[in-house]
Amino acid sequence: MKVAGRLSFVLAVIGFFAWLILPGVTIAADRDWHTTEESLNDAPLKDTMLMYNAGGTDGSVAVFGIPSMRTYRHILVGVDLHENVFSAPTNEGTKNLYPDGKFMYVNDKAANTIGVINLQLGQLERIISLPFPFGVHHISLGPDGKTLYASGEYTGKMAKIDIATGKNQVIDWGPAPSAPDYLDINKKGMGLNGVKYPTYDANRKQYLFSGNYYHSTVGVFELNPFKLIKEIPVGKNPHGTDAEPKGRYVQVADKLSATISIIDVATLAVKKVLPVGAGPLHNVFDNKGNAFTSCFVADSIVKTSLDRLETVDEYPVHYRIGHIAVSPDDNLVFALNKFSTGLWSPTGIRWPVNHEMIDINEKSPTYGKTLKIIPVDGEPHNAKVLFANLIKDWTMGQAEKGGLLSEATPEIRPIHVGNSRITHLPTDTQKPGIVQKGNVKEIHVKAFSYGYVPRQIRVNKGDNVRIIVTNIDKAAGITKNPDVIMGFTIYGPYGTRTMLHLSRGVSVMTEFVADIAGEYEIFCETFCGPLHLEMRAAFFVDGPKGQSNLAVGDYDEASEQKQLGLLPGQIEGGNKATVKNLDQI
Amino acid sequence: MKKAGFQSIFIIFCVIGLLVSGCSKTSNQPAEGPEDVVKKFYAYIKEGGPTTLGEAYKLCSTKHYVQPEDRFRDTVSKFSKDMKVNVLGSKIMKDKAVVKIECKVPSVFGGDFVQESDINLDLDEKTNSWKIDFTGETLTSEQGSGVSKTVPGDN
């Protein structure tokens, strides 16, 4: 009896300690990888890097902590954001450049503008209106850090913009049809912390390279004077056109050829064509001579050694990667995936897309593995990453001492799509086309992979316009991703009044007055498949000057960007800032 | 006598034949016509709420495509609360039906925008009921989902 009593006591003590310990073990096992890391104190975790991501149709830039992949905040900029570029003294370095931490420039495809974000304040400070007609797709920083170059996808034009004044120079890149796409400027070969690569050449001539998906070429432009000097034939429908940091090559993702074309900057000719996964879209580089190419259809990232000019590895992604980013410490690449089939809970008619972080450090035990994957807002486009210590801490008294501000810094809050009125209807089964109903011009549009019917829509200035768009794709299209959402946005003055997201099973209607004449391209703003970019149509508003085209329209008025609801002085650039030769400024 | 016997047998077979055909016709006809199904569908959507939208989802055809229920709920919840749907007519072709509806929503230009649309329905043999092809898998080019000549406006 006495023994039994002692045994019971011992068991009770063991049970008590097990009760104390076991729940803790269970909870720790349920934690995510980040909070289970050992920590010496309870200080909040700080990320060593920050990713800035142009959020596409949500009109804002998302800021993520790296490596936690947690969303820090969103900075509202405009309508449909595509390419973000950090300010830097030069264009040297990887796609992240060597940022000075002052500004970030981000282009708005729907509004035809460039937003300037003050990185230290984390807010939009300026908006530069691009000339009309133009139809910006992407931007790239010039070698002097004072100039931006932009591709006019919808007009076959290229622009050079003085960041300080918003003055711009526009040149034509014909013949039509011409669709300048992604662009970059080759480097001299400056490495990290001012250490020059062995390939550094101070006298290396720098050119602007831009893909053109209608020409299936890469255009080469002299910077001063700004002019087209050559077209280099590459694979079918080139997409990402990116300059490597060592200065030797420009790598082109040949979207429909499933290859990459590596252009030798010294000869301005293709040096090697390498097969990669199907649907190559974009390239980023580390500082070790490697390139990473996103392959949309293959669901993978292909790694290429530019020193050996051969592909060396491939990482799977989940799923349908579009853009791609790299960390400045060379340890991580980020797959910015367009589809997340089956990964997340639904959040509405649009599937969540995701960012996937992959270890590319060959010495790491998790090399080639996915470390983290998160759902993200909007339909994100390019992302760039900087070291977090570039963004100063405002919480330690700097604000009271005058902090980082030396003068008044405005915060601009443009209207996003708040003034638009979008109505969802049962599936419209009217024939596609234009009909006059009373005082309204009613336009029935069918959207499908990859195009619109009617392809051209023509109305008169002052018309009441009602557009009803229907996604007529059947289940399981070319991407085998069910229920792909289509988009319908008219760029420029009508960007804020359209931007329709088209789910199958319904039609979407917008109504507005066509008050600015001109030819404005219609594009699909929601990624729908490999030829999403080529899914285009045109909206013509004829004014008193006659039938509109790229030469006839109220383009000066369009470049004033009144639809953004800005106050006088809040927008710069535009047609009034167009000059014949920017080099003479 | 013999002739009268044949006549009686003939009449009896005719009566049996009529009864059988009448019975089978009655048993193959869904209790609810396609128009009623469409009316009920939009009434459910107008009412909203998780249970009611779940009932609307059950009225959708799964013959050609099974849309996830969450996606369906999110999509139909985008319809304007001011939307009014009237059924204009219907046509039944064996195991298919087309219901023509009229949809009215307020227009920013004043008054209502009125849209006429076709809703295709499939006959679900298992439940002997009409089901709505919500995602338009069976819409034909004649119903506007294909390329057709643009109707010029008055400009």
Image (cartoon, grey):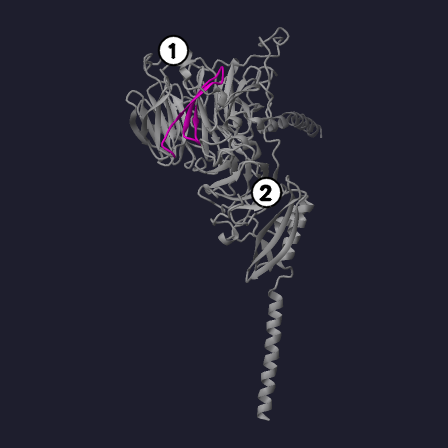
Tell me the residue at 62%/58% (across/down).
Answer: B89
Quadrant into which the C terminus of chain A falls: top left
Q: What residue type is disc 1 on?
A: Val
Q: Chain of mark 1?
A: A
Q: Which residues are magenta?
A: A150-176
Image spot of residue A251 (x, y percent): 36, 26
Residue behind mark 2: A440
Q: Is residue A438 visible?
A: yes
Numbered disc 2: what chain?
A
Circle 1: element type: loop
Where residue A201 sits: x, y (%)?
Answer: 32, 13
Q: Nearer the viewer, residue A551 or A397?
A: A551
Q: Is residue B85 left or right of residue A459?
A: right
Residue shown at the point (53%, 36%) measured from the top left: A343
Tag 2: Cα neighbours inside 10 Å, few (<14), some, or many (≥20)? Answer: some
Residue furthest out toward the top = A401
Residue of label 1: A195
Name which residue type carries label 2: Val
Does residue A90 lie above or below A434 as drawn?
above
Image quarter of residue B92: bottom right
